[in-house]
Image (tube, grey):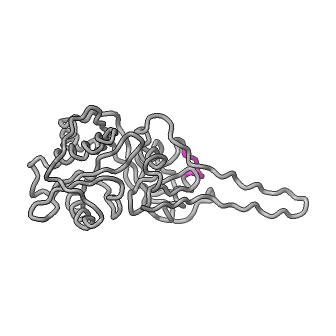
Amino acid sequence: MSEAHVTDHRPAPASHGSGPVDVPAPRRESPAPSGHPLDHPSLSALHGPHAHFAERRGRVVRYPADVSPWTAMPDEPDARDWADAAALAGPGAFVMFMGAAQAPPADWEDGFEIEGVQLTGEGLRTEAYPEAVRLGAADVPEMLDLVERTRPGPFLPRTVEMGTYLGVRRGGELVAMAGERVHPAGWTEISAVCTDPVVRGQGLAGRLVLAVAHGITERGETPFLHAAADNTGAIRLYEALGFRLRRGIVFRGATAPKAPSRAS
């Protein structure tokens, strides 16, 4: 695990005679989210159970780039917030936002905007899956290979550190997995649900989702998950397992400016 806190360090300029003195802008802290934790999942997580991952600049907070792609912004970001997000990511870096209310400003290059859905599993009937094995750092190369073949969504070299990941092996090879990702207080997202095409149709994804959910509910939390709104097959599966639609959510990705903004 890693922890990095990036903040503004702005020394006051020296005074010259009796002329006016510029007063440095006050340090701005990342605000704790208001409202329901799932209204701003990544922001809630980085202020809560995942605070040890948080990298900050001003009011912007994100996961380390090799853990998760999500950057969290204030409810109503201003020009300085966008400049801080760009500085935190680095010139020309690709940045992803979960549930961002506003699109990036004009000096950011458009990447994608995906309409999604957020589903929650209150009262879910979960169960352990004896065939599933716990996956860890030693399994990451195989996990990355499975993700590359199945494209379930963002999964990076240290994503496995975000929570419990379970997998199924056949003939010694990893053929299916699911695990925990964003973790607001009281809630845990199930993600990276993927199955190799050679074993699809055997119910592995559903059993893994319920097994991961079982671990979440055993510690007194509630599982939730996200899916692209047009991924009707996945949504049907999750609803059949007992998840229910909570709301729509937008996922955005954009490229930060290659030159720093004056607002930073």
**Main secondary structure of the magenta stretch:** helix
Q: In this rendering, would 23 be left or right of 49?
A: right
Looking at the image, which is closer to me, 25 or 106? 25
Query: Can you give x and y, in whole percent of width and height, for residue 138 in the image?
Result: 27, 67
Specify whether residue 3 is painted magenta: no
Q: What residue lies at 28% left-to-right and 36% top-to-bottom?
A: 121
> Bounds of the magenta span?
77-81
Which image quadrant is residue 161 in?
bottom left
Looking at the image, which is closer to me, 52 or 34? 52
In the displayed structure, would residue 228 be above or below residue 264?
above
Q: What residue lies at 91% left-to-right and 59% top-to-bottom?
A: 18
Query: Can you give x and y, in whole percent of width and height, for residue 185 in the image?
Result: 42, 42
Q: Considering the image in quadrants, where does the N terminus appear?
A: bottom left
Q: In this rendering, would 58 be left or right of 67?
A: right
Q: What residue lies at 58% left-to-right and 47% top-to-bottom?
A: 78
Looking at the image, which is closer to me, 186 or 234? 186
Query: Can you give x and y, in whole percent of width and height, for residue 237 in the image?
Result: 18, 40
